[in-house]
Image (spheres, coloured by chain):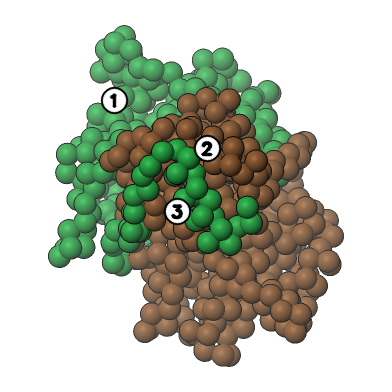
Chain colours: A brown, B green
Amino acid sequence: MNTNEYKDILVFAEVQNLKPAENSLELLGEANRLRNELGDNTRVLAAVLGSNISPVVESLFRFGADVVISFVDDKLAEYRSDLYGEALTRIIEKYKPAIVLIGATFTGSELAPTVAAKLKTGLAAHCTELKINDEGNMVQVVPAFGGKVLGDILTPNHRPQMATVKAGITQKIESRDFTGTIEDFQCDLTGFGDRIKITGRQTELAKGKPLHESECIIGGGFGIGNKENWTLLEELATLLNGATGCTRPALDEGWSQDEHAMIGTSGVAVRPKIYINAGISGAAHHTCGIKDAGVIISINKDANAPIFEVSDYKIVSDWKKIVEAVVTKLK
Amino acid sequence: MALNIAVCVKPVPDSKHYDKISIDPVTKTWNRTGIPMIIGDLDKHALEAALTLRDKFQGKVTVFTMAPESTRDNLVEALAMGADEAFLLSDKAFAGADTLATSHTLAAAITKTGPYDLIITGNESDDGSTGQVSAQLGEWLGMPHIMNITHLGYQEGVIELSVVTENGSVNYEVVLPAVLGVTRKVNKPRLTNVMGMLKARSKPLTILKAEDLPVDVRQIGLTGSPTQPGDIYSPKMGRKTEEITGSPEEIADRIILELRKAGISV
């Protein structure tokens, strides 16, 4: 393969609720940052698929897309792994980007390996950092063993170099002055029949404030103990106009009802100004999601809890006494 | 209709012992000496999904793994849980495989020993957690594939599924054969018992090498892997860890001070 034929950076711009996914906008920002490392003639392409996407297409320019590739087809109204896989593959074959970035959403996490397999190219999952090395190849930093180990992944001899990135890892840029062009794309999607049929949909919007919009996050883990205790964390978050986040055990116990509130390798990465957490031991699964938080204050009754090593402030105490005292004072 | 089901599992280091994982600063390899290998958590949900379907509709459950021969006991455990047959794909030529080469190898074994009505995997492995093999297996096999499954039912040749998304859930019907990736929510895996362990010993467990499979040698192991690993390291996340002490009221005052300093209006 002649890797020199492949130049631009393509971002899959996922549509959620008729809007571009936050995760995709963040990746347009990251694509602009990588473009600066690759050289100015690198373009940032955004690919949008769907049936009613013109508002999304227009909005992508101000987040840094130079070219928006718009594929409008009624068959793409809702995500299906076979149709979306085919559509994005054909777009990549035509535009030959050197790099393809896809948000590690539920859709993106399935679409990315599908497309990588069709193109027989390399894909790095859930990258925590992307950079360009001296040879002009993308170095993709990925977590393993729940974030205990980080490793560099390269795709030196195949193109495109594909990566998925979770929400909250990279940062969006926005300017009304950015402009670009729209290019329509079409390809045949008739060969897939109805092997996969969508029969229903239940919409369940995230409860409470989204984590990525919160300057203050209150996190809780298994040490919170029960559902009633959990409401105390929610009360504190509300008083601070913030949000609650949780670990996998707190979600599995049903204390935090919100799948979107899970922070870490299997959830989201967050960057609030301040992160106050209680009853979290500090497994790498969770802590890799808080590394970009401003100030971290951790409360745990175990003085040796690993969470303290990654904290600015350590409070060895019964978390409930401390949180109750803060709530009382704030009221 | 009886269902012939393949389940792919991956032996992984037990996550309870991740604190023992270390990185050799010279060879830049990670060391997992002394950490027991187990079947991944999600893989047990995949196996349970297959066993539940077989118990209800008859048929057969065959387990596949691509791993060193030392993981034989992990496959015996899968047989003890109730699987009927197991294949261990083990060959030096498979070493160094990324997800594309791994899924190619698994697909070859499935093609060779099939046909199967359904192929079920965990949504992701416990160790690498890339979540890529399930979809890529579907692509190599030319079958429809769906991941993030929270509910799985079967009726007259059609699989009924619920899949979790950012905004709730979507229901699908999928025509067989298909490849499915399941989440923890799909079921509660059964435990193995002594009877199961005893039965497992007489169930077939076959080791397959590269020469036994219809693989393209350019697409297996390190050669067939577009991705290449580079440097590995421990994340640097250490912070100053200043201890705040005092009565709960004093500590609360300090927390409120830090909130103000961070720019939160209180």
- Residues at discs 2 and 1 in contact (Cβ within 8 Å): no
Kind of residue sitting beneath label 3: Ile
Local secondary structure at mark 1: helix
**Dot 1: few (<14), some (14–19), or many (≥20) neighbours within 10 Å?**
many
Residue labelled with disc 2: A325
Q: Nearer the viewer, residue A237 or A150?
A: A237
Dot in front, 3 or 2:
2
Residue labelled with disc 3: A296
Q: In this view, does B145 lie above or below B186?
A: below
Q: In this view, does B235 lie above or below B193?
A: below
Q: Which chain carries label 3?
A: A
- Relative horizontal placement of residue B165, taking residue B109 as reference (left or right): right
Q: Which residue is drawn at 18% across and 63% down?
A: B25
Local secondary structure at mark 2: helix
Query: Quick one: label 3 or label 2, which is nearer the N terminus?
Result: 3
Q: In this view, does B91 lie above or below A34?
A: above
Kind of residue sitting beneath label 1: Val
Q: Which residue is drawn at 22% across and 44% down?
A: B20
Q: Which of B192 and B75 is in front in this view?
A: B192
Res A271 label: none
Q: Which chain carries label 2?
A: A
Dot in front, 2 or 1:
2
Res B76 label: 1
Q: Where is residue A246 in the image (x, y as percent from the top left)?
A: 52, 41
Q: Where is residue B62 in the image (x, y as percent from the top left)?
A: 41, 28
